[in-house]
Amino acid sequence: MNGPDSFPADETAEAEAIPGRDLLIVAKFFTPTEAHLARSFLVASGIPAVVADVNHAQADQFLLPAMGGVRVLAPEEYLQQAQDLLAAREHGDFTLSDDVDVGQPE
């Protein structure tokens, strides 16, 4: 993922196991908001995901780069699907065109 608030893709290319947990790092972000948006996107796509390190990031944003950013985590069996979805999202595959009519709520 190479968005304005994300770490370079080469830093998250390989899955990184978290000691004592069955969750792996899917992506890292510079802001908690971007991490929560990515997590929500994954959950809406059927992938169980969580955000880690938000409290540390909010307490002291100057330490955020040293901490490695705010992490989005998912179970190992969903890792590849989650990375593929986030890459497609970053690429713009889920972007609506300006002329799409989303309709009125009923």
Image (cartoon, rainbow, N blue to C red):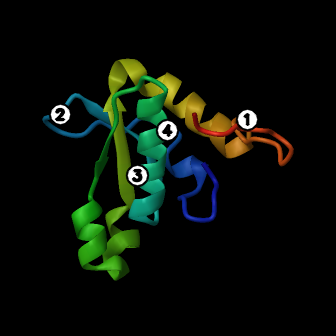
Q: Nearer the viewer, mark 2 or mark 4?
A: 4
| Residue beneath disc 2 | 21
Give me the disc on residue 36: 3
Whichever of callouts 4 and 1 sits on the residue coming sooner in the sequence is 4
Whichever of callouts 2 and 4 sits on the residue coming sooner in the sequence is 2
Q: Nearer the viewer, mark 3 or mark 2?
A: 3
Whichever of callouts 1 and 3 sits on the residue coming sooner in the sequence is 3
Give, as a three-letter code, the residue at label 2: Arg
Q: Whole-percent x and y of residue 38?
A: 48, 45
| Up-down relation of residue 88 to residue 80 (above or below) | below
Name the image quarter holding the C terminus. top right
Calculate the distance from the C-alpha at mark 3 to the C-alpha at mark 4. Answer: 8 Å
**Which residue lies at the image location 24% right of the left edge and 40% below the top edge?**
18
* Mark 2: few/some/many CA within 10 Å (<14, 14-19, 20+): few
Give, as a three-letter code, the residue at label 4: Phe
Q: Are marks 1 and 3 in contact (CB under 8 Å)?
A: no
Q: Whole-percent x and y of residue 95?
A: 73, 42
| Residue beneath disc 1 | 93
Give the SS element for disc 4.
helix
| Up-down relation of residue 75 to residue 25 (above or below) | above
Give the SS element for disc 2.
loop
Give the SS element for disc 3.
helix
In the picture, measured across the screen, residue 28 lies left or right of residue 93, that is left
Give, as a three-letter code, the residue at label 3: His
Give me the disc on residue 41: 4
In the picture, measured across the screen, residue 12 lies left or right of residue 32, that is right
**Which residue lies at the image location 69% right of the left edge and 36% below the top edge?**
94
Q: Which residue is most to the top?
A: 77
Calculate the distance from the C-alpha at mark 4 to the C-alpha at mark 1. Answer: 13 Å
